[in-house]
Image (cartoon, helix red, strand yellow):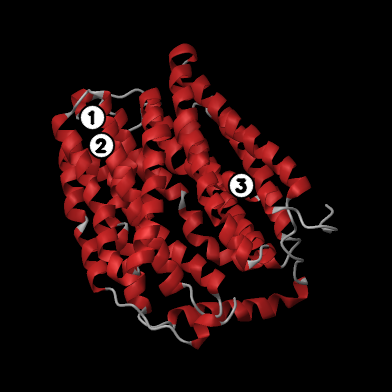
Amino acid sequence: MNTTEPKKTHPALWVPTVYFAEGVPNVAVMIVSLLMYKSMGLPDSQIAFFTGLASWPWMLKPIWGPLLELFKTKKHWVIGTQLAGGIVFALLSFALTSPNYFEYTIVLFGLVAFISATHDIATDGIYVNVLTDKEQAEFVGWQGACYNIARVLSQGVLVYVAGQLEKQLGVVIAWRIVMGIFSGTLILLSVYHYFVLPSGGTSRNVTTVRETLTAFGDVIKTFFEKQYIWWGIAFLVLYRFAEGQAIKIVPLFLRGARDVGGLGLSTSDVGIYYGTFGPVAFVLGSVLAGYFVAKRGLKRSLFILCCFFNVPFAVYTFLAFTMPTNFWIIGSGVTFEYFGYGFGFVGLTLYMMQQMAPGPYKMAHYAFATSLMFFGNMIPSMWSGYLSDFLGYKYFFLYVIIATIPSFLATWFVPFRKTDASDMTPA
């Protein structure tokens, strides 16, 4: 592959598409897989546990991230992971016809997660290495926008299409087609990025492995030497404690039969809610929260953001007890919850950027922080299905309200560390 760059490729040609490619596999593993397995009749406990297990690579990505510096360029890794992801989605499509489809597909979803996590590391590496500070600021909005476009198309449009195809062609064929669309999308993006993606810098010589491992040890050491680090870790883990449990069960609750306490929505109905109401409300909440924090400062805003993040989960308690059938009532509930989710998530993101990342290893420490944050989401999500099966949807969502208490406590008591000169050292 030719990685020389005679002239700089304009960021508008690759930033939107590469972050769209980042969002597609993430949403496929975290959300779309839940709805696919639900359509196939699997129990909620099994779905929540194993899809949560498959998402481990996003938590562990700092372990192998530094190794990407040793071989080839970041462009090689981005294109290679997009192509590999497309191939694995094709294998998923074929695996759905097997009598042991669940065992095969859950392993393949785990492989997708590993490939996607590697793609995330390389993508962020290109972004911070190629773009100037001004360009990074100009295009950071495109990151979130295109990631959410991937969310809309994946968990909205494609889920709606799957629901329509289920009625015409059957569940298995419907989801084989959807997995095939995921496959083709990533393969086409890898071809496009072959021509437009900058290299992201040359790789290091593999003879420097010892140096790299020594530096990696210093990255870990300095992270745990930060002021109030254990308070910060507790905050990252507990902030999403309730959300990690609710987010796995909500789509299953929406699809669940009414005689077992679900709302009995079709796959297409869920696709409409997740493809229109949810993402629009999420983006609006995120944008408004950014202005809110910019005016007040993070320290004065964090507890309010926590309230926005957690209180809307009461919507699902209301829906579980009233079991409405009206499209607009359910849509309003989903919209309210996603708006609060988007508004409150900004607090977590800014805390990681401003309190956890500053120092001589900004990029690596931010990756550590995101992994800890993901851990706080993933572990509760794995047991949520068992709790939901045991308690039923009504009392499960009541429990979720109680489970928000650790988030409020962690937010109220977390101290803010003082900035120092080392925070200004470039990563």
- Residue at label 2? 333
x, y percent for residue 60: 50, 61
Q: Which residue is mark 1?
A: 329
For the point 43% across and 30% down, the residue is 36
Q: Quadrant of residue 396?
A: top left
Kind of residue indicated by mark 2: Gly
Question: Looking at the image, which residue sits at the far top?
Answer: 168
Q: Is residue 362 left or right of residue 214?
A: left
User: Which residue is at the far bottom?
Assistant: 421
Amino acid type at circle 1 is: Ile
Query: What residue sits 52% from the left and 20% below the top?
Result: 173
Question: In the rendered image of this protein, does residue 347 appear above or below residue 47?
Answer: below
Q: Position of residue 329 (x, y in %)?
A: 23, 29
Q: Residue 16 bears which disc, if any?
A: 3
Q: Residue furthest front?
A: 295
Contact? badges 1 and 2 (CB < 8 Å): yes
Sequence-first tag of 3 and 1:
3
Residue 418 found in image quarter = bottom left
Q: Secondary structure at mark 2?
A: helix
Total numbered labels placed on residues in the image: 3
Callout 2 environment at 10 Å: few (<14), some (14 to 19), or many (20+)? Answer: many
Q: Can residue 126 be seen by looking at this rendering? A: yes
Q: Kindly identify the amino acid type of the residue bearing the numbered disc 3.
A: Pro
Report the Cα–Cα distance between label 3 and label 1: 34 Å
